[in-house]
Image (cartoon, grey):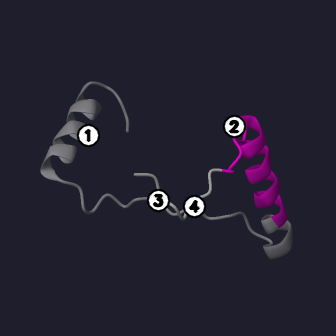
């Protein structure tokens, strides 16, 4: 059943336009604050054993995640 609270009037945004908008907003932030936007990264401390094994196998094969 479809949600009755969601209006399906959202428009699609081409990826290039989205990227340009993000770049513009980041530049405006940097001008206003004086430093670049800091994007939080996942520390990887809560990885499951299977994920650790997968990343280890990727590294052993010469890849880098």
N-terminal-most mark, 4 or 2: 2
Check contact, mark 3 vs mark 2: CB within 8 A: no
Q: Residue furthest left?
A: 49
Determine the main secondary structure of the stretch shown in magenta: helix
For the point 25% across and 62% down, the residue is 46
Instruction: Specify few, some or many for label 1: CA neighbours under 10 Å numbering under 14, 14-19, or 20 or more.
Output: some
N-terminal-most mark, 3 or 2: 2
N-terminal-most mark, 3 or 1: 3
How far from the left and from the top, in percent, is residue 16? Answer: 75, 36
In the displayed structure, 12 sits above or below 60; it is below
Check contact, mark 3 vs mark 4: CB within 8 A: yes
* SS at badge 3: loop
Q: CA distance from mark 1 to mark 2?
A: 29 Å
Q: What are the residue bounds of the magenta stretch?
A: 9-28
Q: CA distance from mark 3 to mark 1?
A: 17 Å
Check contact, mark 3 vs mark 1: CB within 8 A: no
Q: Quadrant of residue 32?
A: bottom right
Q: Which residue is identified by label 2?
A: 15
For the point 56% across and 60% down, the residue is 6
Query: Which mark, by number, is residue 41?
Result: 3
Instruction: Specify few, some or many for label 3: CA neighbours under 10 Å numbering under 14, 14-19, or 20 or more.
Output: few
Q: Is residue 60 magenta?
A: no
For the point 32% across and 26% down, the residue is 62
Q: Is residue 10 magenta?
A: yes
Q: Which residue is identified by label 1?
A: 55
Query: Which mark, by number, is residue 39?
Result: 4
Q: Residue furthest top?
A: 61
């Amino acid at each position: 059943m479809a949600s009755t609270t969601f209006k399906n009037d959202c428009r699609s945004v081409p990826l290039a336009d989205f990227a340009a908008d993000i770049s513009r907003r980041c530049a405006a932030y940097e001008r206003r604050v004086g430093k670049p936007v800091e994007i939080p990264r996942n520390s990887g401390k809560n990885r499951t054993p299977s994920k650790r094994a997968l990343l280890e196998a990727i590294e052993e094969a010469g890849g880098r995640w």
